[in-house]
Amino acid sequence: MRNAFSSALVAAAKLDPRILLLTGDHGYALFDEFRKACPDQYINAGIAEQNMVGVAAGLAKGGFRPFVYGLSAFVPIRVLEQIKLDVCYEQLPVVFIGDGAGVVYSSLGSSHQSTEDIAALRAIPNITILSPADRYEMTQCIKLALISDRPVYLRMGKADLQPVHESLPDFQVGDLCNIKHGTNKMCFIATGSMVSTAIIVSKEFEDVSVWSAPCIKPLNIDTVIDITRSHQLIVTLEEHSVYGGLGSAVSEIATGYAPTWICRIGIQDRFSQFCGNYEYLIQEHKLDIDSVLVQIENFLFHCYGNRESV
Amino acid sequence: MPRESAPMQKFDPKKLRQTVLKMAYAGSTVHIGCAFSIVEILAVLYRSHLNLVNNNPEDPLRDYLVLSKGHGVMAQYACMHELGWLTDDDIQNYFHDGTVLKGLSDAHVKGLEVSSGSLGHGLSIGVGLALAAKRKHTNQRCFAIVGDGEINEGAIWEALLFAAHFELSNLLVIVDKNGYQAMGTTDEVMSLGNIADKFRAFGFETREVNGHDELELDRVIRDLMNLNSKAPRAIVAHTVKGKGVSFMEDDNRWHYTRLNEDTYKSAIAELKSEEPLSIS
């Protein structure tokens, strides 16, 4: 997925000299190709993220197309106010790339993990939030970011998972992607790294639909209503807090238009407690396949009194 | 025999201060003191230095005036009124419901480059504008006004590092050193030491001026911008908060105090009493 990101950005920057890549001294190796191909369009702004976002706003006002790269713990979290006031208030075409979202930096601890980035940005007007699940969605997300005339946040989570699509999906801003059609009254909607988990877990049930949400804001209301109307149970999955992310966005639409049972699987309002590798941290947060299955079974029991109803 | 006098020049500070007072009285607003300390700085910039192409606040080749200390925005409104960018109605209806001019610099208003007032934002945007101009090889310049209280913000120092590293010689940062911030003097709240020395240490071509002496301001800005140096430029302008109305000068209450009929009238009277003669 990181290669897809790098290739798409390099290809675009070669064609459009207005594209500038700003980084807060992060992205070692990731930007080798970019620096080689477009050295004049690469700006290392130093370990100074607040200024970097302000500078990006000024560059955008001056006619450039800045891509601001950082770890998602810093971009957007550390610079939330700059994103709000300097960029979103003026609706400037700045693209923010938050890398390592979720618990990717498992062994570095809470300073480098971010499970609140989507929630924080969702409440800011004018910004589009993209959260690709694989390299194909990433390629399409970069394409959408490039043609956007407004602020975009591109959340880059666990990047080396297997593709969930077989080819480039043709989605637009707001669209959900259907991965798997099914007739079960239960349906999964997932984003980012949790789409592949959703696909695997779905096999434990008969004929469950799976949707990927590569765009969390805006979220196509009609599609979500169609899904919630045609299913009794929705399971949302994300490597993000259960507050304010995909699960919240789906629930907000459902409560307004087509209420149904929704099980929000994500980080349960807690920081990581221990050090460990990515798989360990995913287990700690009960986002591994077995734990997700247990949560869904508990949910079914809560809804129907037994697991066998679906 | 009538005395000879200079023709009344545009951006007369006394007139600008009267406009500020009119707005502050009409809108019952605060922040008069921090508008008054930058009146001469703005007057000199608008009169002699800002290239306002075709008097169009949106011309893509204009020079940029970034008011990072957004609290002084009434002084900028007064200048924009002189330019014809704001009408008498805008001044008279300041802060009325449904109007567009707010109490802090707001980029949705044509002529204001940044949304500021949350401090430490504007300078970085100004740095980005200066960098954009450099990259496009235009001769646009960026003049950014920051408050001395504002430079408590860490982002200011990030911006200074960046401006020096990227050799933004088309950037002039003017520090309005009026010696006060919201809760007291800068010495009481957060000692700044020697601001000019700090800017020099960050790689800026730096001068200190009396921020109310228009001739000195004009000369030093010209000298700095004509320097053959790759460094960004800075001026530490020694100013007086509330400058121009005796009972407001150096009295931090006028950061927060609203005008009543008495204070409004006496402030206006004081500014009018010393008005230079004009050729009619």
Image (cartoon, rainbow, N blue to C red):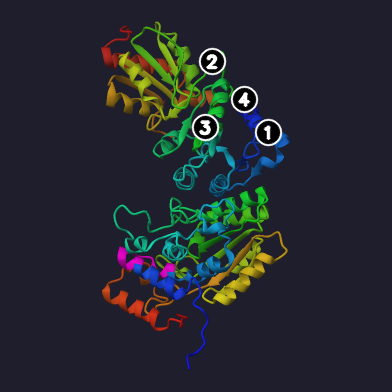
* Residue with the mark numbered 1: A14
- Secondary structure, mark 1, is helix
Q: Residue furthest bottom?
A: B1
Circle 4 marks a residue in which chain?
A
Left or right: A108, with B182 as reference point: right
Is tag 4's residue or tag 3's residue first in the polypeptide sequence?
4
Q: CA distance from mark 2 to mark 3?
A: 19 Å
Asked if the stretch drawn in magenta spans residue B91, the answer is no
Q: Name the residue type under label 3.
A: Leu
- Secondary structure, mark 4, is helix
- Secondary structure, mark 2, is loop
Is tag 1's residue or tag 3's residue first in the polypeptide sequence?
1
* Residue with the mark numbered 4: A4
Residue occupying image coordinates x 52% and y 22%: A133
* Residue with the mark numbered 2: A165
- Residue B4 location, x and y as percent? 52, 87
Write the start and end of the magenta stretch as one range.
B23-35
